[in-house]
Image (cartoon, rainbow, N blue to C red):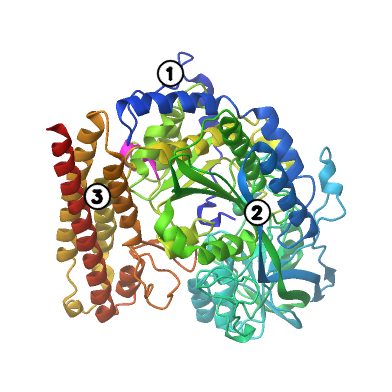
Amino acid sequence: MCFARRTWFVASALCFLALALSSPLSAQAQTQTSILGFTPSSAAHEAEIESKFKAIPSPDEERRQHHIFTAEPHVAGSARNNELARYIADEWRQEGLEDVIIRRYDVYGSNPKSTFLEMTAPVHYRALLREMSVPGDPDMKNKSISSAWSGMSASGEVTAALVYAHSGNPEDYELLRKQGIDVKGKVVLVRYSNPYSYRGFKALTAQREGAAVILIYSDPAEDGYKKGQVVPKGPWGPEYHIQRGAITYDFMVPGDPLTPGWASIPGAKRIPVEEAVSIPKIMALPLSWHDAKPLLANMDGPVAPDDWQGGLPIKYHLGGKRVRVHVKIEMDNSTQPYYVVEGRIRGAELPDEWIVLGNHRDAWVFGGVDPSSGTASMMELTRALGKLAKQGIRPRRTVVVCSWDGEEVGLTGSTEWGEQFADELRSKAVAYINVDSSTSGPNFHGQAVASLAPMLVETTHTLQDPSGKTLYEAWKESSTREHSEGKQEQAEDSNLADTHIGSGSDHTVFLNFVGMPVLGLQFDGPYGVYHSAYDDFFWMNHFGDPGYRYHTLMSQLWGVLALRLANADLLPFDFASYASNIREFVNELAKDKDKWGQDKTMWGLDLKPVLAAVDNFEAAGKRLDESAAHALASGAIDPKLADTINHGTMQVERNWLNPDGIPGRPWFKHILYGARFTYAHLELPGLTEAVEKQDWPTAKQQAEILRQALVNNTKLVNELNSTLNSETAEAGK
Ligand SMILES: [Zn+2]
């Protein structure tokens, strides 16, 4: 789904012009002579392997695979999605992947039986709840395109008055209350993104307000004609496009709602549906603006405030009396099998150290961008890895690749798999690299925990962007443009990678539950058909990536990152970079001190000890960086010593976990990264939420947990540094 990052990228004709006018004397991607974590000779060897690897993925193959995955709708739990699981397993076996297995999880799934909406007063209108075909796109005539539905909606039938509640966030209901409008027992109509919040948060908010139904529509101001040309002429959403999506409360706990914290394998214990906190109790339905317009046009009540007015040529009113609607939703929410496909290339030297890669397979409809662009990139990546393995070129460590299921429902497949193998992952896993949607345009967006940000940035120097620049240069330019939309800020190496990691895709279980470092990769562009049927093969071939060059670049980037982590002599974790990032998080929180409330004593909450612990962690990280650089430059590292150091550095991420979890959400164990209920990223989640609630005793506790984790990791990194120094000195004698 990737909604955490669905920022409706600002389509700027200028940015394409800038690319077109840029220097034809562009730099070629360099073969690197030094690589973080490698001795000079292994860096040279690595560069050879990488150039062989990068030569394999091809745009034609990316397109061919993309066509297979987007040929039919393949929602989680459907026969087609399961058939694609078998297809992936067969392909992987042929490509030379090992231990290919399809794992079954019996999870609480969600499917529509029927949905119905009509306006009964003041005039009759029956909503289409369907997407009309457009000239030139044969897939839009496919009979198996679903009608409008929301994953995990409750079933029921209601006839009630309709209220327009803007974006459906708590402050919107405050405003309605001030206008004397109560939504209890009524139907609320809200927009998707103004400002953006996850639809599940809108549903929970409406449920808390006592509304009977929430209708969520796509206003043309957000992803339609107000942004630019719509399908079939441009990339934005047309009149009939419907943004499907789940409303699962997976910000409380992701995965199967009936097995919170353990895997849904056969025979697993399950909690009763009534006890599952992530299952919504409200009815929900998504609407196109075609269906929302007659409702909005007939509303009475006060005129909505200016910033509530949308892109339709009508005056938006708050409603509440005149318009009445009749909604009937019948869902089949019940336990059904989801399938995760798993394969690997066993490591030649260190098979029990894993680099895990993953992409989800399930799509709301065809999944042109989300997720089949990523699936195509994954298939070319595995073909290239398999081809190298057949030539005897194997990674030193094991590369595990997974095709997840039910990501769109509640990050379900990856969560169950991560929960099933949590212990093994905590001892073996080096990192997880997620690609959800691989491509909706040319602008690279790379996410990383800060310890891996430097290696991500370094890797982009070796890749060629279709613009003719290196990926690094292209990234820096698009990133500077993005930054300058808000504030004048030049993108620097240190802020290129996005280290603010919320939830919204399959990295969540690995980061927040298992304690693995994660990376997330995506190319972005103007994209207004998210989760609609128009997100398909036609869209990709006309707007997203017509030449499949960014798909190809994604396979290369994803693979090179995996190979670097798999082949490094010393794992390229940079803890000094991690420390400075944590300092930013703490300072960000401290900056808002004025907003902390009237109680200036704050029960003695003092962030200085935390900042002092950050300084110590940074100093330890710097010393280890220097020692590692020194040891690597010496040309050879004793394998046993490397093993000690690598297993030690792998432990650092695990040490950010608090076994009790963050207050109120025990599943989310990471103390640096979390997500708000809106799906916005949330740094230092336990501490930040306590401060925002002005719950000073909890805030003090959380600050102490953070300080203690910093102390533990400083101690660990210092010990590793002493070991590395003494043994390197020994070897030098
Ligand atoms: Zn997705």
Name the residue: 49% across, 45% down: 398
- The one nearer the camera, 533 or 721, is 721
Q: Position of residue 298 (x, y in %)?
A: 74, 69
Label 1 residue SS: loop
Residue 596 found in image quarter: bottom left
- Binning the other alpha carbons within 10 Å of mark 3 as few (below 14), some (14 to 19) or many (20 upward) gives some
Residue type at mark 1: give it.
Answer: Ala
Q: Are marks 1 and 2 in contact (CB under 8 Å)?
A: no
Magenta-drawn stretch contains 354: no
Name the residue: 41% across, 25% down: 45
Label 3 within 8 A of ligand 1 by Cβ:
no
Above or below: residue 274 compared with residue 593: below
Q: Are marks 3 and 2 in contact (CB under 8 Å)?
A: no
- Of label 1 and label 2, which has the lower sequence position? 1
> What whole-number distance in Å separates the C-alpha atoms at marks 1 and 2?
43 Å
> What whole-number distance in Å separates the C-alpha atoms at marks 3 and 1?
31 Å
- The one nearer the camera, 128 or 353, is 353
Q: Which residues are magenta?
A: 491-497
Residue type at mark 3: give it.
Answer: Ser
Q: Position of residue 344 (x, y in %)?
A: 57, 46
Q: Position of residue 656 (x, y in %)?
A: 32, 62
Label 2 residue SS: strand
| Residue 542 appears in the rendering | no
Residue 349 found in image quarter: top left
Residue type at mark 2: give it.
Answer: Ile
**Residue under label 1:** 27
Magenta-drawn stretch contains 494: yes
Q: Position of residue 637 (x, y in %)?
A: 27, 36
**Residue under label 2:** 101
| Relative side of 377 to 49, left or right | right
Label 3 residue SS: helix
Tag on residue 580?
Answer: 3
